[in-house]
Image (cartoon, rainbow, N blue to C red):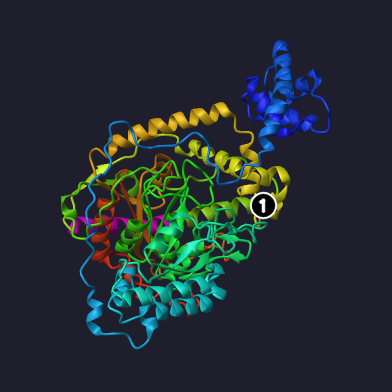
Amino acid sequence: MLDRRTFLAACSTAGLASPLFPGVLWSMAADKPKITAELIDAAARVADVPIAEDQKQMLLDGLNEQIAHYASIEKLAIPNSVAPALLFDPVLPGRKLPAERLPMRISAVPAVHASGTPKNLEELAFATARELAEWVRTRRVSSTALTEMYLERLRRYDPKLHFVITYTEERARAQAREADREIAAGKYRGPLHGLPWGAKDLLAVKGYPTTWGAGGFEMQTFDEDAEVVKRLDRAGAVLVAKTTLGALAQGDKWFGGRTRNPWNPAQGSSGSSAGSASATAAGCVAFSIGSETLGSISSPSTRCGCTGLRPTFGRVARTGAMALSWSMDKLGPICRAVEDCALVFDAIHGPDGRDRTVREAAFHWDAQLDWRALRVGYLKKAFEAPPPAEAATGEPAKTPAEQKKREEDRARRALAQARREYDRKYERAALDKLAAMGVHLVPIELPEFPYDAMVPLLVAEAAAAFDELTRSGRDKLLTEQGPDDWPNQFRVARFYPAVEYIQANRARMLAIEAMDKVFRDVDVIAAPSGSTQLVATNMTGYPALILPNGLRGEDAPKPRSEDPERNVGGPGTPLSLTFLGDLYGEAKLLAFARAYQEATGFHRIHPKLDQKSGGEGGATAGVR
């Protein structure tokens, strides 16, 4: 029997690269046992693709030849964990990776420890991992007590924020007891020893479901822990929960509901590392692990006021993690402070012998690194005022409904521009603060490429990763079914010609080469978090550090909608700033970002979870 996948592949074999023609032809012939020349003519008229007589025969011949081959591949039932034979590597020939391995140099003992052991352990809920590490190392706070405190907070606030899919209490309590025994015996594993953490539920954990946040996968299990979980186990960290993610790593809505922003629970937390960011910001874990393909660490870190590290592509082994895009997926920490990200990254980076994209390269965290010696750029155009919104033109509306829609669109655009103009003063204040710190900022522009035109690469890989889901019709079990959601996007991707996929990858290589030239002149680049850099750096594999950059004041434009899908920004919600680093340049990136964070202190402001919305600590527009 001829199936749709085989048919489209044969069309490509026959040289019919148009995404429309094969789809039209298939829809006309889906119920037919045989494709005929007449059907090809009809489909060609609909698709406006000229097909010569000799091309028709070649197409028919190609279909017959390819059916058996593609059907046999489908029978393999390839699991999500199997990567393609082709590897993405952003490192150009001649580039030398860090090789010198030196002992980690963490910051001095935090001043908070001079005040003695807290009477109420919840006073430590929002402490940084670096601070918690000292409490545990000195045995003034046990890992068991810390674990129980965070488990209780997770239970208390999950009904409000919906950030947990599965609690790992039995595992956590056993790990905490072992950590306390080891530390008492003088076997201290390092600054993560005994610290409770949360894992985005695309990481496999033996003995517990790994749901990928998606309907139809609620009871899925794996027989082996993900590599990142193994490494954090070896560091002595305590896994307390598997946190939410939008279904199959899209957005913040999962099969159990929508994860919420601790600063304003009327808003979603953004995604897809939704639960990792929300739980960290809410003081319910010491740190968490998220993943990013195209914004899934950056966006929830921004929304929830966290500090998130998206490492260089190929820095952290993804073995045991759900694959969405083999050439773009990255695992990284979401924390409350920059140094926390460095401590977690130190534990999880490096090859495991299974993820073939991961290179051998040293990482040396040095909290005393002289950040003043670094060359720092900023994306000049991205920090400039946005152009005013263009007034709508054209014929008058023909119906009241059309007029209403136009007015709603106009109001939406006006609000978006007002919000952008309001937020811009925080970005400008960040540049002023950097200058006050003595940083000489070099104006930089990203290479101009059609980055958005490369995004279909991600969707095509995702559609392949979940091929069976689409072919079987089980995609209807996913919560969201709109035009921008995975079920439709996976179907759209099937019309992406193989030739255009290759061409987009060639354009991507040009972008990598151009980006390499930019980082010959700078070590770090300051950028607005939501600018073009997000797509450009994800496509080219460069690391980024996202950190809090203040709270919006009471004069901020209020959200236009109460719908959590569209309810964004507003008074008392966090903003972020992004620092970009060179490939494998995480040590410099983190050191510089930490200097800015320590100079501003915005990571010390935390949400008041028992209020309806808003955060504590005020909301001035400037940067301290």
Which residue type does callout 1 highlight?
A: Gln
Q: Is residue 423 magenta?
A: yes
Q: Is residue 526 magenta?
A: no
Across and down, in percent, residue 342 comes to 31, 59
* SS category of the residue bearing label 1: loop
- Locate the C terminus by quadrant: bottom left
Across and down, in percent, residue 170 comes to 52, 74
Q: What is the residue that sits farthest to the front in this orientation? A: 185
Q: What is the residue that sits farthest to the bottom in this orientation? A: 119
Across and down, in percent, residue 288 comes to 43, 64
In front: 216, or 206? 206
What stretch of residues is rendered in magenta?
Answer: 419-436
Q: What is the residue that sits farthest to the right in this orientation? A: 32
- Locate the N terminus by quadrant: top right
Task: Name the chief secondary structure element in magenta.
Answer: helix
In the displayed structure image, the side of residue 167 where residue 181 appears, left or right: left
Q: What is the residue that sits farthest to the top in this orientation? A: 54
Residue under label 1, please give it.
Answer: 481
Quadrant of res 238? bottom left
In the displayed structure image, the side of residue 154 where residue 17 appears, left or right: right
- Asked whether residue 208 is in view, the answer is yes
Q: Residues within 10 Å of mark 1 (few under 14, many from 20)?
A: some
Which residue appears at 81% of the width and 19% of the height?
38
Quadrant of res 159? bottom right
Across and down, in percent, residue 395 comes to 62, 40
